[in-house]
Image: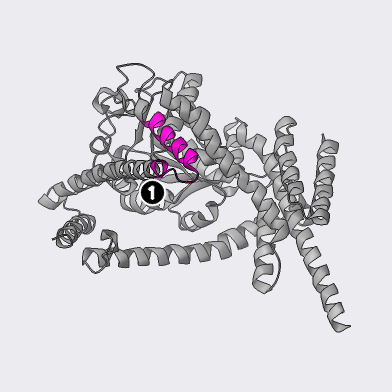
């Protein structure tokens, strides 16, 4: 039962979407089912967010209770979750500070704490990349040399100072990088990756619809 | 100013040498910090050619008739604001100036609706646009594939209310917008692979023209869509945003950031060259010692 019901649901949902895509039966029974299925998917998606919150609370609360190492960080995580979530969920009618509109507690926390912290974490990559460029990017073989040369050319092409430098070597060099590197070799490889990934996704979807692939059920 | 920038580059070379001599990577971090902070304090405007894909997007938006319906997405996390927010701002300047009817949405729960709210309200104020009449923020709904597909049948079934909880039937702007059939153009600004779904679901299945703004790291992937004509222009990273700002005539955050990006890119290139020179010199001396 635990396996059969999810397989039936997966098959029926997928079957409806495939039929509506290929046959486009706008007014038929299947056609009317399509928006219903999509609405259900967004509703289930909402519940997965709730599941994420429950999971984070359970894991972190358990660690704090056991007085495990780094429990201070786990407490900070829990405080952050509730400080953001509770004022955001309460109705704006109670107070203009509640809800998610501009001027609310959630909005203030997001713009003044969350966004700067996330931007800072991401910006630190620049420091690590510069350090790694000096210590690790080595032209050890032909492939690595090709990669390094291409990377240097593209990095120069993407900045005004580099563009001036490339133009000083030959006026058509920036255009050639665009044509042969980005719209040439890069595009051919990316196209291959995109088509390969799409074929893989189609095969995996078919396996799920037919009940062959069961890893999504934790099997 | 050129002298100051020249001195800064020399300082970077000295710091790189110190990093090599002492093996302390903090010298490299210090050089990067200089290169990021200095251009913000002393702005250097460098001439740059407009990328063809940016011009294509600008011309596509510019050729839209007045009052066209445009969907602008804020599909990005706060971590990439430096690259993506200037794109959204430049797009809004262009769209508001053309009196387009704009509805915004996001597939990112963490901050997407707040960023959309903050940016659109700020710029709408500059152009005297009214919420609910000229623009609306639909906010976030879970499960993006279902959201993108479902909006093809009915936007109202996916978003019964806007981000503030107002029912869509109370908003004048949404009266004539029922599904993708009523949308003239989609301007998707994103820092993740949602662009693939915009292309494969919305462009391929509903035939809507889509222009994108993506981070520099993502841009190479989407040349395939540009070349096939499925994507109508693209802003790639800060350079794309700076180009669009220039075309719109509102040079701002991205234009300012290009000097910092230029210096950091040059420093990274210099680091790669220096690191490889040291590697080859050491390799050669090891080989000579081996022969002895």
What segment is highlighted magenta in the picture?
A63-85
Q: Is residue A55 visible?
A: yes
Q: Depth check: give the residue in front, A135 or B263.
A: A135
Q: Is residue B96 visible?
A: no
SS class, disc 1: helix
The 10 Å Cα crowd at callout 1, few under 14, some 14 to 19, many 20 or more, is many
Location of residue B188 with respect to A203 vertically, above or below = above
Position of residue A153 measured from the top left corner of the image (x, y, whole percent): 69, 58
Q: Depth check: give the residue in front, B275 or A86.
A: A86
Seen at 70% across and 53% down, the residue is: A131
In the image, residue A61 lies in the stretch drawn in magenta: no
Tell me the chain of label 1: B
Position of residue A134 measured from the top left corner of the image (x, y, whole percent): 73, 57
Q: Depth check: give the residue in front, B264 or A28.
A: B264
Magenta stretch, overall SS? helix
Position of residue A55 measured from the top left corner of the image (x, y, whole percent): 34, 45
Picture quarter with the N terminus of chain B = top right
Q: Is residue A18 shown left or right of residue B141?
A: left
Seen at 73% across and 32% down, the residue is: B43
Position of residue B41 measured from the top left corner of the image (x, y, whole percent): 73, 30
Seen at 76% across and 64% down, the residue is: B276
Read off the residue under disc 1: B198
In the image, residue A78 lies in the stretch drawn in magenta: yes
> Image quadrant of residue B136?
top left
Q: Is residue B74 shown left or right of residue B50?
A: left
Q: Is residue A191 shown left or right of residue B34?
A: left
């Amino acid at each position: 039962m635990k396996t059969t019901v999810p397989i039936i649901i997966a098959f029926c949902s997928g079957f409806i979407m495939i039929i509506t895509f290929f046959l486009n039966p706008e007014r038929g029974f299947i056609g009317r089912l399509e928006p219903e299925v999509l609405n259900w998917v967004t509703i289930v998606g909402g519940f997965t967010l709730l599941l994420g919150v429950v999971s984070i609370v359970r894991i972190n609360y358990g660690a704090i209770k056991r007085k495990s190492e780094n429990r201070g960080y786990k407490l900070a995580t829990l405080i952050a979750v509730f400080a953001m979530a509770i004022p955001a969920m309460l109705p704006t009618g109670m107070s203009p500070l509640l809800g998610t509109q501009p001027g609310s507690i959630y909005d203030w926390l997001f713009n003044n704490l969350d966004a700067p912290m996330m931007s800072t974490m991401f910006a630190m990559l620049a420091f690590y990349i510069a350090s790694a460029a000096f210590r690790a990017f080595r032209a050890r073989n032909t492939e690595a040399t090709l990669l390094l040369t291409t990377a240097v050319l593209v990095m120069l092409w993407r900045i005004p100072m580099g563009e001036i430098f490339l133009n000083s070597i030959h006026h058509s060099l920036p255009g050639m990088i665009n044509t042969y590197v980005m719209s040439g070799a890069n595009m051919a490889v990316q196209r291959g990756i995109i088509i390969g990934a799409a074929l893989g996704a189609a095969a995996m979807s078919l396996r799920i619809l037919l009940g062959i692939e069961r890893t999504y059920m934790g099997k | 100013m050129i002298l100051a920038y020249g001195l800064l580059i020399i300082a970077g070379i000295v710091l790189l040498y110190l990093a090599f001599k002492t093996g302390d990577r903090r010298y490299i971090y210090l050089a990067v910090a200089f290169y990021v902070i200095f251009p913000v304090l002393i702005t250097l405007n460098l001439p740059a050619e407009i990328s063809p894909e940016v011009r294509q997007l600008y011309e596509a938006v510019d050729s839209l008739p007045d009052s066209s319906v445009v969907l602008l997405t804020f599909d990005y996390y706060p971590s990439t604001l430096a690259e993506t927010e200037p794109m959204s701002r430049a797009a809004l300047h262009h769209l508001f100036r053309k009196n387009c009817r704009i509805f915004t949405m996001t597939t990112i729960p963490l901050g997407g609706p707040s960023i959309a709210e903050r940016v659109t309200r700020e710029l709408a104020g500059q152009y005297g646009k009214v919420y609910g009449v000229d623009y609306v923020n639909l906010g976030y709904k879970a499960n993006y594939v279902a959201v993108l597909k479902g909006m093809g049948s009915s936007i109202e079934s996916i978003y019964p209310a806007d981000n503030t909880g107002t029912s869509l039937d109370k908003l004048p702007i949404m009266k004539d917008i029922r599904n993708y059939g009523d949308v003239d153009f989609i301007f998707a600004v994103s820092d993740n692979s949602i662009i693939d779904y915009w292309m494969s679901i919305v462009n391929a299945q509903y035939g809507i023209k889509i222009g994108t703004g993506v981070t520099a790291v993502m841009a190479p992937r989407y040349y395939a869509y540009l070349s096939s004509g499925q994507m109508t222009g693209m802003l790639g990273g800060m350079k794309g945003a700076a180009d669009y700002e220039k075309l719109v005539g509102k040079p701002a955050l991205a234009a300012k950031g290009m000097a910092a990006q230029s210096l950091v890119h040059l420093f990274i290139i210099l680091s790669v060259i220096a690191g490889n020179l040291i590697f080859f010199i050491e390799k050669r001396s090891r080989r000579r010692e081996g022969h002895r």
